[in-house]
Image: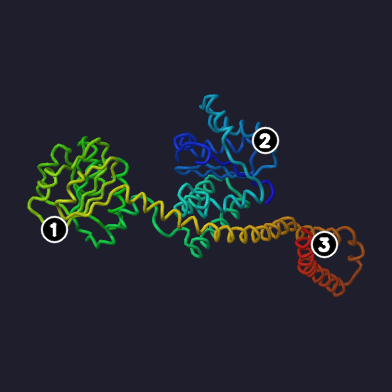
Amino acid sequence: MRNIHVLAFTHRQLEVSQIGLLHIGMDNQQERLSNLKMNSDLEELLFLSTCNRVEFIFKTEQEVDEKFIQTFITNLYPDFLEETITLFCQNYEYYQEINAVKHLLKVASSVDSMVVGEREIITQVRKSFDSCRKFGLTGDSIRLLIRFAIESAKRIYTETNISQRAVSVVSLAYQTLENKNIPLDARVLVVGAGVTSTNMLRFLKEHGYVNFVVFNRSVEKADSLAVDVGGRGFPLSELRNYKEGFDVIITCTGAEEAVITPEIYEQLLHGDTSEKTVIDLAIPHDLDPVIPNIHVVEHISIDYLQNLSRKNIKERTKEIIYVEHIIAEAVFEFKKMAKQRAVEVAMREVPEKVKEIKATALEQVFAKELAQLDGESKETVEKIIDYLEKKYISLPMKMAKDILLNAQ
């Protein structure tokens, strides 16, 4: 596909925090991207932003060199300091035409992701296109490219195991509860209200769990997370006094020593002798190592989950060879589709040109001759011309298409 380019800033060259500098809030995207499109003389533009990549897919006849990229970044991010502009001008990936197509297929199929096999990227690609289309930034070329990339990604997720086996700690922790048949009304006691605990609770809520109690050093954060999941929040200092029991503990704090001591755990049990599950996502562990030795508890540590994650990532990585084969087939198919589309666009004006020639012939070139004919003869001539016009627009155009497609 001619004049299609991709400028990508990814986790391979940059820190996630650096990539975050390139993010543009939804409220500002239309104005800033529209100005970029106009000032950089772009025919089409798509902006894709995720937690570990920011990419620009655009169509232009300009030469995309170092000067172009520097101007591109400066126009879109006028508040960047010179050193920041230099950082991004020195750390990017650039693809054009068929290599751009192949790159986007890899992005949509998650082969290029930080976590191989995470299907969220296909939704992110679709939403990015929908937004840019709504802003009037995209056109026919990017529309066809994104549609093809999404269709190919769906095929990859269906025909391979690239997205099988969970790899995120949150997903693996949930699978552990699911495998143990922990009921949805289980009493979930949460220690810590940081990012990991927040993600874990939201995940559990999405899957039907409803009974949450949150303890945190900052009671404001405990309350905020508790409200978010429909639970109750308490200060961490009240943990030892909690007497309503629990079935599952999820803990993740930044404490340097065990937060759940044997004494506190004993008080939390409040005489309950049934088996409990503790998902300990902290480093170092929040659960005192003595506790599993004196109580019936399954201690699922972050070490265990990370080890399982590494194994699953290896299994997903094995699928890349099959994914690459599908991508190669898809690139070949896209080349054929792009050729046909280019021919269709090139020949789009032929029918109108034929009609113009017909009108000129009847109204100017042969106007005198036609005027001398009687009504029946004139009608016959017009029928012949109409017949030739239809045949010329259909059969010769089909032949021309075949010739052009085979010649390219």
Query: How far apart are labels 1 and 3 at the CA level?
Result: 91 Å
SS label for mark 1: loop
Confirm or deny contact between disc 2 and disc 1 (CB under 8 A): no
Query: How far apart are labels 3 and 2 at the CA level?
Result: 47 Å
Q: Residues within 10 Å of mark 1 (few under 14, many from 20)?
A: few
Which tag, 2 or 1, sits closer to the chain's start? 2
The extreme top residue here reads 82
Viewer-side label of 3, 2: 2
SS label for mark 3: helix
Residue type at mark 1 is: Ser
Residue type at mark 2 is: Asp
Which tag, 1 or 3, sits closer to the chain's start? 1
Confirm or deny contact between disc 1 and disc 3 (CB under 8 A): no
Which tag, 3 or 2, sits closer to the chain's start? 2
Q: Residues within 10 Å of mark 3 (few under 14, many from 20)?
A: some
Q: Which mark is residue 152?
A: none
Question: Is residue 169 or residue 124 the one in the foreground?
Answer: 169
Q: Is residue 333 left or right of residue 157?
A: right
Asked where in the image residue 208 lies, by quadrant, the reply is: bottom left
> Looking at the picture, how far across and down is residue 228, in whole percent?
26, 46
Question: Is residue 126 or residue 39 the one in the foreground?
Answer: 126
Asked where in the image residue 73 lies, by quadrant, the reply is: top right
The residue where tag 1 is placed is: 274
The residue where tag 2 is placed is: 65
Q: Is residue 172 left or right of residue 210?
A: right
SS label for mark 2: loop
Residue at x 44%, y 35% (from the top left corner): 17
Residue type at mark 3 is: Lys
The residue where tag 3 is placed is: 358
> Looking at the picture, how far across and down is residue 376, in whole percent?
85, 75
Q: Is residue 329 above or below residue 214?
A: below
